[in-house]
Image (tube, grey):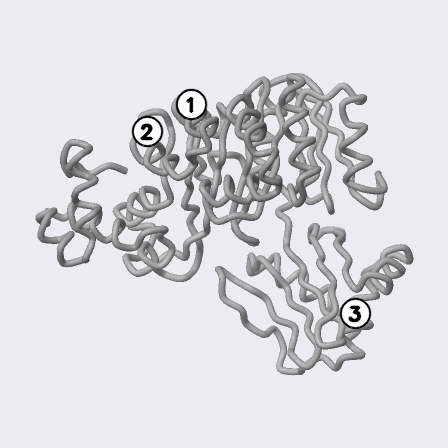
Amino acid sequence: MNPADFNSYLKLMVHKRASDLFITASLPPSIKIAGRIAPVTKEALTPQQARDLVLSVMTPSQREEFEKTHECQFAISLAGVGRFRVSAFYQRSNVGMVLRRIEGKIPTTDELNLPPVIKQLAMTKRGIVIFVGATGTGKSTSLAAMIGYRNQNSTGHIITIEDPIEYMHNHAGCIVTQREIGIDTDSWENALKNTLRQAPDVIMIGEVRTRETMEHAIAFAETGHLCLCTLHANNANQAMDRIINFFPDDRRAQLFMDLSLNLKGVVAQQLIPTPDGKGRRVAIEVMLGTPLISDYIRKGEVHKLKDVMRDSTNLGMCTFDQSLVALFHAGEISYEDALRYADSANEVRLKIKLAQGGDATTLAQELGDVELVEDEAKRGGFSFRV
């Protein structure tokens, strides 16, 4: 494959609004559109072609790192086309890579259909806000939109630490300093250790992967800064479990206290296919650091957080299941996908049927979910809540 062919694939990604391009030995180059993968040519790449192509988009230092570690994360740009995040790797002793398309224009929170509470979190003076979700669910995009809102509506210094830099922020109301691991700083540890010396107001950590990074995030919040970060977890409860598991048992009491004082919000998201298969809609779960949420975290009673989210929609919180029900009733997603992506398919099924006029007890018994009926009854009936 020559460079012109590869560039044509990048242009095709942008034209088709594909999210990813896959370069794999013994398979044709393929793109993912609305969650579905399709080949862009009939000819499979030989192992040597795949290797040559991957190495051709790397700098000499990136090639050296790749040969040493068999992994490399970086970003590339094609003039007039756009930016792409690259993850290069070995598999079955062959070289491959996946390129993620990065939108050239940073979308707004409104364009992403994010709830209004996201703007409030963006303007918070201090604390920790965590975006969670699986790979490819739009965490980085939502976080970029949040930073964009802060940049347009306040003054101050925003520092981002990323591996690699994805969205390029212009200076607006704020000075935006973007640092890339391996280019602008040697390591996460060095970048995080020196950040407070750079007079930040907002610090964005591209991803929390270790206990040490989480400790830095807590320290930033405790010293009066807003710390925004991402974490790989499926929902708010799993995010809490993952953070807790970073720390040994003898440090968890202090961790619960620190989180209860500093955690301002956890935003989880999934991208759900539209019924026509031509697009995706975002389903959002929001947990806010209200006094009740903070109290449960301080006590280590994280299993109670989901109920508080479900019962606090008036404060801006919601669960994934409530978001899925709302999207279904708006005609944005199918019934099957509402159940497929639910944390509790039975609860989503019950809420949808109740909204359509079904009898609560009968429906719950049919679903084998009598406990849910009892829980709803204790809360004062079966009024439909989204």
| Badge 3 vs badge 1, beta-carbon distance below 8 Å | no
User: Residue 53's mark?
Assistant: 3
User: Residue 290's mark?
Assistant: 1
Q: Position of residue 47 (x, y in %)?
A: 76, 79
Which residue is drawn at the image coordinates 43% and 39% (left, top)? Answer: 113
Tag nearer the camera, 2 or 3: 2
Which residue is drawn at the image coordinates 48% and 49% (left, top)? Answer: 234
Per the image, label 2 sits on a secondary structure element best described as loop
Q: Position of residue 328 (x, y in %)?
A: 29, 50
Q: Please determine whether, in this image, residue 286 is positioned above or below residue 20.
A: above
Mark 2 neighbour class, 10 Å CA radius: few under 14, some 14 to 19, many 20 or more: some
Q: Quadrant of residue 178?
A: top right
Q: Which residue is mark 2?
A: 312
The residue nearer to you, when weighing 343 against 281, is 343
- Name the kind of residue labelled 1 in the image: Thr
First in sequence: mark 2 vs mark 1 = 1
Q: Please determine whether, in this image, residue 64 is positioned above or below residue 262.
A: below
User: Residue 48 vs residue 91: left or right?
Assistant: right
Q: Quadrant of residue 345?
A: bottom left
